[in-house]
Image (spheres, rainbow, N blue to C red):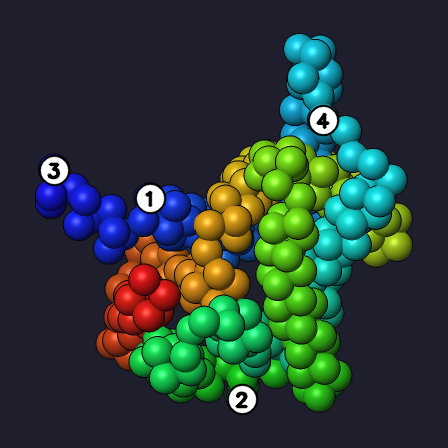
Amino acid sequence: MAVDAVRRSVWPAGMVTGILAGLGAGAFWGMTFVAPLIAPAFSSVELTVGRYLACGLFSLLLMLWALRRGNAQWPTWRQAGAALWLSLLGYTGYYLLLVLAIDAAGAALPVLIIGTIPLWIMLLGKPHGLRWPALVPGLLLTASGLLLMMRVTAHEAEGGAGPDLWLGVIYAVLAMAAWTAFGLLNARWLGRHPEVNSTVWANWLGVAAGVGALFIWAVAGSDVASLVQRPGFGAFVLVCAVTGIGAAWVASVLWNMASRRLSPSLAGQLIVSETVFGLLYTFVWSGHWPAALQWVACGLFLLGILASINAHR
């Protein structure tokens, strides 16, 4: 009994649940790294639209199922507006900016800029009672891992940069700012609305993201007939379904759980698990081992997570 009491005092149940939920969200988000490799004949815009249309449809079906069972929870106009705004920041708007960045500057540089999101959330989301020196080890370890990743992909940035490098950098910075704002504002909204559980909020965000995907499709999407005729359309549908339900809806539920139980600075640190899982999935799909520096970078990411957990404990 005494041992159990000590364990509970050192690792509060809510904190453990939040950490596992945050890592689970990273595991599902990592799927998006390998999605373009599975359906190479389809553009990033098409994969993004398909992903969020699948997420929106799945969320809507869950809401209708809850309505049939008599326990549906529908948003007020104010809540619906918050869902639309936050889905624009963290879902469709963020991915559209990222796609524009990659089109303009190539893949390497925008991905590295996006990779700084955990650092910004850790810095901007620090709890008032937590001293800055406690965060330094986790910040340094995560920053060191990012620097190593930058070194590994530096040749991509040099050889694969698009024609509008600085425009791409601007888009990538805007995407980074959008998701950072989403991470902080989403946690604040959940804290102010305990009556809305994580699953219900994920459904509302999912439907809002589906509406955003329809708008992107109307502006920049391809017609359905041309999509169906392309080779690998079945794989495209499968990728959209898996990433829409797994990497969008399930990850959203898990991230909401983490955001309720953890401070934004600790939850933000867990985002680096997305990179680790994404690299793992990519290596498994490609059938080759990562470079030595990538192993070291992943190790630094994991040590950074552990250091941040220790600081917040």
Q: Quadrant of residue 174?
A: bottom right
The CA span between labels 1 and 4 is: 27 Å
Query: Going from the N terminus, do you reach mark 3 or mark 2 first?
Result: 3
Local secondary structure at mark 3: loop
| Residue at horizontal 54 percent and vertical 41 percent from the top | 253
Mark 3 vs 1, N-terminal side: 3
* Residue 73 % position (x, y): 72, 26
Residue on which the image places disc 4: 73
Question: Which residue matches tag 3?
Answer: 1
Residue 158 image label: 2
Which residue occupies 83% across, 56% down?
A: 220
Q: Secondary structure at mark 4?
A: loop
Q: Nearer the viewer, mark 3 or mark 4?
A: 3
Name the amino acid type tagged 2: Glu
Give the crowd class for mark 2: few <14, some 14-19, many >=20 residues within 10 Å.
few
Q: Quadrant of residue 3?
A: top left
Q: Residues within 10 Å of mark 1 (few under 14, many from 20)?
A: few
